[in-house]
Amino acid sequence: MTIGHFVDGKRVCGSSERRADVFNPATGRRTGEVELASAADVAGAVEAAERAARAWRDASLSKRTAVLFAFRELVNARRERLAEVITAEHGKVLADAAGEVQRGLEVIEYACGIPSALRGGFSENVSTEVDSYSLRQPLGVVAVISPFNFPVMVPLWFVPVAIACGNAVVLKPSEKDPSAALLLAEWFAEAGLPDGVLNVVNGDKEAVDALLDHPGVKAVSFVGSTPVARYVHQRGSMAGKRVQALGGAKNHMVVLPDADLDLAADAAVNAGFGSAGERCMAISVLVAVEPVADALVGKIAERMARLRTGDGRRGCDMGPLVTAAHAAKVRSYVESGIAAGAVPVVDGRDVTPDGEADGFWLGPTLFDHVTAQMSIYTDEIFGPVLSVVRVGSYDEAVELVNANEYGNGTAIFTNDGGAARRYQHEVEVGMIGVNVPIPVPMAYYSFGGWKASLFGDLHAHGADGVAFFTRGKVVTSRWLDPRHGGVNLGFPTQT
């Protein structure tokens, strides 16, 4: 099976002869191939979007919301099918895939309320018989470049909001799991979205560069690793585009001595190993403020022993990693952690998976006595590896978190409201959980981190999303009273 593109309302084949294999990570078997778009293919998608954008920007808010409501109903009715597609190409278990679809639905529902989000302000009589008012208008054609780990949720962070604001979109999903994005485009068309308003081009760096360089693309939304996010931001900005590039993370979960250790252990396992750790919001560092480390590590290890790693369609707790190459990379981090002197409490290389032998397996892994100099601490591993760092005080924990180059998400577990309030004030991170391990905001707030986790000024969805996909105008108007007359060549003044 060859997976192509979706341009101007239909599935199409591109001009490029380059292809990439698509696998089922739970079996290791090749299930198809995806076309890798050329610059010419990208240009064709942008041209279709430019044609469609002219009419779509003038579509009434009622028309736009009608399409979004219809799209929401289609996604909701077919959520199980969408979850199955995610699991087949990404590998995450079906329950996790269903949760991803639900979070995407929440952004669609937020976008359905776009008439309220786009309301401007009005001031009467700012000067004598002069009124001023503000409004927001679409940019035109925008690009969305999404990662492999959330093939539905991340595109839905951006696409519904961009379309609701009156833009046309070119979406480039990951070539590792491209099928879900094509389904979303087809369902948008079924919901009544005009041809060309949403286009999907599959590809690799060549397609990304073509989107970043094309003068018809006015803005770019990106989610991926920090090195690529930095590159996207720099190249897109140099081309005069508005860019929001969400990068990597090294999320810390601080556990204070007064915390409920059972709650903290449950949270660490859930947040560290869900989706095989392939989440930018995964907890990858547990900061244990002594004297709780020994007890907490023991409780986490007990819970890990009950986890089933295997095929996501078999009711397992954790699935495989997305590719054989990525599984090998994460294994190399486990090896480097042991070599550096970290204590492997649970070694995921020893896992016996409930799945085929050729799947891309690595079980949940727990390291203790990790230091800030080890690569398993400094690097974003993007796999099921949880590192425990022991510190002596709250202040030492905050210093550790703030010294890290990333600032995506963090959590603190405590029963002390004062400590929690102090932490949320002092920590230099964009999203904070208090006794919540993965503090992903609801759709009507905005998602994004600080420092090397975000390049650009505006976060995803919510009010920031609306601001990103629109430009503001302020109009100052005067309708002359019929009684007014005369000529005055003096400098205009406010009266």
Image (cartoon, rainbow, N blue to C red):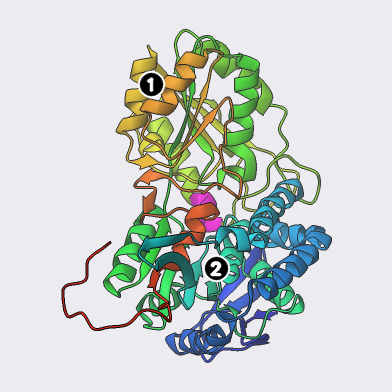
Up-down relation of residue 59 to residue 494 (above or below): below
Boundaries of the magenta span: 324-328
Residue sitting at 56 percent across and 16 percent down? Answer: 296
| Residue 347 spot, x, y in % from top left | 56, 32
Asked whether residue 451 appears in the rendered view, the answer is yes
Residue in front for this viewpoint, 63 or 181: 63
**Disc on the earlier residue, 1 or 2:** 2
Which residue in the protein does label 1 denote? 397
State how many labels appear: 2
Q: On the image, which quarter does residue 239 sit in?
A: bottom left
Instruction: Residue at the far right: name it.
Output: 77
| Residue 44 spot, x, y in % from top left | 50, 90
Residue sitting at 68 percent across and 47 percent down? Answer: 319
Comparing labels 1 and 2, the label whose residue is closer to the camera: 2
Q: Residues within 10 Å of mark 1 (few under 14, many from 20)?
A: many
Which residue in the protein does label 2 denote? 162
Up-down relation of residue 126 to residue 337 (above or below): below
Q: On the image, which quarter does residue 249 sit in?
A: top left
Q: Amino acid at mark 2?
A: Ala
Up-down relation of residue 174 to residue 320 (above or below): below
Q: Amino acid at mark 1?
A: Ala
Instruction: Check disc 1 and report its element: helix, strand or loop.
Output: helix
Q: On the image, which quarter does residue 395 sit in?
A: top left
The answer to if 422 sits in the magenta stretch is no
Asked whether residue 342 appears in the rendered view, the answer is no
Q: Quadrant of the C terminus?
A: bottom left
Q: Main secondary structure of the magenta part?
A: helix
Horizontally, residue 188 falls left or right of residue 215, namely right
Residue sitting at 74 percent across and 68 percent down? Answer: 71
